[in-house]
Image (tube, rainbow, N blue to C red):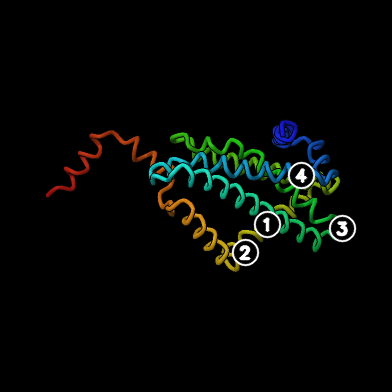
């Protein structure tokens, strides 16, 4: 177990550094599949942990809280796999090759590495900015991984990564709607809340000085 956790940590650090050697190891050894899957789940869980203030405000019980972290990690890992499948499909159409789907999935899952810092989105005011930085960082990790898989062909990797991402967006807005609905329903079943408020909304509400609220009530008074 200790060796597995160490491999996860080292792999995540090297992926965040865009180290080609890390991607070569993931590509070469099939057993790394469990490691990158764990990295993806941890990244998704950490991201939800940063939004945990919503769960606390909605008084989610500890057991459901833990289950929600695990669920978010699994959903996040699955979303990365869908992106990996879209990248693989794009590469098969535009750049016919013999790249196995399993390699594309494992390397795309490495894009979760920056999200181990996902809990930082909880920070007031800076949370949104940090979230965007993590998204860009994740994209760069996936792009670097695909470049490694394409044997250094950056142009092909960029095209496949971007088109793959666009395909996922289109599918989410069309045929993926029932899946998204089922995901949201399952999440509500586990957490007991649909989480209508965003993290920043809640933080802004709690950060507002009491006099602001009283002044607003006076302004609204006849």
Q: Which residue is mark 3?
A: 97
Residues at discs 1 and 2 in contact (Cβ within 8 Å):
yes
Q: Residues within 10 Å of mark 1 (few under 14, many from 20)?
A: some
* Pointer 3 or 2: first along the chain: 3
Residue depicted at 43% across the width and 51% down the height: 195
Q: Residue at x 23, y 34 (%)?
A: 211
> Which residue is the site of mark 1?
82
Q: Is residue 100 above or below residue 171?
A: above
Distance between the alpha carbons at the discs numbered 3 and 2: 24 Å
Task: Measure the C-alpha gap from mark 1 to mark 4.
Answer: 16 Å
Q: Is residue 93 left or right of residue 208?
A: right
N-terminal of the pair, mark 1 or mark 2, is 1
Q: Which mark is residue 145?
A: 4
Pointer 1 and pointer 3: residues touching (CB < 8 Å)? no
Percent from the top left, x then y, of residue 115?
61, 40
Residue found 28% across the figure and 33% down from its top: 209
Report the residue marked by disc 2.
171
Mark 1–mark 3 Cα distance, whole angstroms, equals 19 Å
Q: Quick one: label 1 or label 3, which is nearer the N terminus?
A: 1
Please name whichever residue, 201 or 103, is drawn nearer the observer in this view of the structure: 103
The disc, 2 or 4, on the residue closer to the chain's N-terminal end is 4
Specify the farthest residue to the right.
98
Residue 66: x %, y % from top left = 52, 43
Q: Nearer the viewer, mark 1 or mark 3?
A: 1
Q: Work out how far the residue at label 4 is from the one at label 3, CA to CA, in angstroms.
A: 16 Å
Mark 2 vs mark 4, CA separation in Å:
23 Å
Q: Position of residue 172 (x, y in %)?
A: 59, 62
Q: Are marks 3 and 2 in contact (CB under 8 Å)?
A: no
Q: Helix, strand, or loop for circle 4?
A: helix
């Amino acid at each position: 177990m200790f060796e597995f956790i160490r491999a996860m940590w080292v792999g995540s650090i090297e992926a965040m550094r865009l180290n080609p050697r890390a991607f070569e190891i993931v590509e070469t050894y099939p057993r790394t599949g469990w490691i990158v899957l764990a990295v993806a789940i941890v990244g998704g869980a950490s991201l939800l942990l940063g939004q945990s203030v919503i769960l606390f405000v909605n008084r989610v019980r500890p057991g459901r809280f833990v289950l929600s972290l695990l669920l978010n990690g699994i959903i996040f890992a699955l979303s990365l796999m869908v992106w990996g499948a879209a990248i693989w499909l794009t590469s098969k159409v535009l750049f016919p090759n013999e790249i196995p789907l399993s390699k594309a999935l494992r390397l795309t899952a490495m894009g979760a590495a920056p999200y181990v810092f996902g809990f930082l989105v909880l920070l007031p005011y800076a949370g949104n900015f940090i979230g965007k930085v993590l998204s860009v960082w994740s994209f760069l990790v996936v792009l670097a991984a695909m470049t490694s898989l394409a044997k250094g062909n950056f142009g092909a990797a960029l095209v496949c990564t971007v088109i793959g991402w666009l395909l996922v967006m289109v599918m989410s807005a069309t045929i993926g709607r029932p899946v998204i609905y089922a995901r949201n329903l399952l999440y509500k079943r586990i957490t007991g809340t649909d989480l209508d408020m965003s993290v920043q909304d809640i933080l802004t509400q709690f950060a507002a000085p009491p006099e602001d609220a009283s002044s607003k009530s006076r302004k609204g008074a006849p």
